[in-house]
Amino acid sequence: MVSSFCWGCLTRLPSAPRALLPPTLTAQRVAAFHTSTALLAAKKGASAPKYRQGTSMTMKKKKRPAERTRPPAVGERKALRKRIVLSNPNALEIPDMKEVSNETMVDSRLRGSVLGLPVPMLDQLRAVQAFQPKQGWSIFRRPGTVVRRETLEIARLIDGISGEGEEKGKVVKKIVSGARATGKTVHLLQAMSMAFTKEWVVITVPDSQELVTATTAYAPLSDENPNVYVQPEATAALLSRTVTANPVLSKLKVSREHTGLKAPVPAGTTLEDLAKMGIKDPAVSWNAFQALWAELGAKSAAPGFEKGFQPRPPMLVTVDGIAHWMKESKYNNVDVQPIHAHDLLFVRHFLSLLKPGTGQSSLPNGGMLLYATSASNSPTIPTLDVALKQVAARQAGVRPSAPEFPHPDLYAKTDQRVLDAFDSYGLPAPKEGTLELQTLAGLTREEARGYLEYFAHSGLLRENLTDEWIGEKWSLAGGGVIGELERIGRRLRVNTA
């Protein structure tokens, strides 16, 4: 029997509600684009991942502990920074190269040539820290220096002081200045090598900046002088350099008694043993240095010390970078106020040598003072510039009362202690010269030719050294500045022809 309901009647029946449909079909109809997100959200306690975030399982890697390297030892970085290399086995050896000696140092015919430093003298020069890391010693077979006009001038002065003529026992005082890379530090090295040749006693301060940067210990001199300070470690280092570089001290004996040391100094003690007392015990290093300085200036022996007394040799005193001593140091006093560098006994002693001696010469047995400025590592001190101009004016014969005599600016801050340190007016002792200013400039063309020929003979420069080529490089080097000539000469050139 056929049902009375037709297909049209079925289509007019009301549709079933959405809740009666299976949950799966409902989720599929709701999710129009991503089905996995809706299905995952339907689970109890589950949260939908972020947009485009992976759902795969990730395993965290276990972090390994960072490897701690061994820190450098104390002084290792400084030793590496100041390492000096004096030989290059790859450079060619110059067979006919002459050395610094009593004859060659005063031979004017060798002007412009390069003289080698004797091998036995290298240890002495190392001891006084005459070499600097940035001077290019490592590009040649052996260290050598060029003979310039100022070199011959210093050599003649040293030869005259050591001789038996009228200049015997003379005291020469010079401030060496000049532009950057003009060879001021090497000029001091040349003077040291000549002094060692004449068996002088050489005392050096290779870096004056280290004495004012608060890197060494300091203490008041005494309760009576609390505003004057000693530097025991720096003084002990000075004594160590002096003993190592001057073997002549082992031949000289004391000439008087000395107090202030922990042990008595008997007759027959050598000056080397006297200095070693301050090296072993820095607490008495300043007293040991004063005793050594008094012995080097002795003219005769006291009663009871006549046996074994020998005349003292002349002295060469060099200080490099003197501008660091013309300002306040990094040290502080008890009131947390900066201490002026002139209140340090170490600095005060060497600056007092520039003044005319009171009663006797600053170097009774003769010698030379060479204090150099620095253009690459130097603070800006306007008072020092005025003081050096005043030294040059006095050297030229200009009186302080003359209108052309340089004076500091009235509206500028002036350090009177700096001006007084270079004021050389007074009654000097016999054979004691006044303070002079020596300004180093570039090499002449003839000296530049000899210097560049040294590079060519060493295999570093492969060019035809014509007059035109020498003149061109001399001009490019700022008029023969030796530091710029070294940069030109050390560039290897190979001729393609």
Image (cartoon, helix red, strand yellow):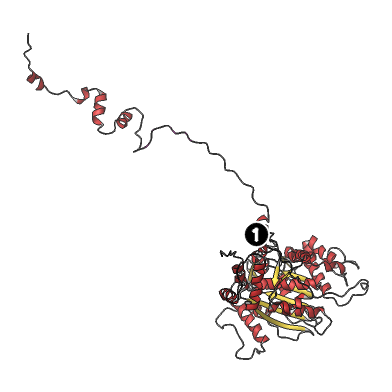
Task: Give the residue at x 84% y 82%.
Answer: 164
> Image check: 287 left or right of 468?
right
Looking at the image, residue 479 sits to the left or right of residue 438; the answer is left
Q: Secondary structure at mark 1?
A: helix
Decide whether residue 60 is among the magenta residues: yes
Label 1: which residue? 81
Q: Which residues are magenta?
A: 52-61
Task: Tell me residue 233's x, y (percent).
Answer: 73, 63
Q: To which quarter of the image does residue 151 belong?
A: bottom right
For the N terminus, the quadrant is top left
Q: Residue at x 26, y 24 (%)?
A: 24
Out of 213 and 192, give the one closest to the viewer.
192
Of residues 323 and 108, which is closer to you in this image? 108
Horizontal and vertical percent for residue 431?
79, 84
Most common SS among magenta residues: loop
* Residue 468 location (% of width, % of height): 57, 76
Q: Amino acid at mark 1?
A: Arg
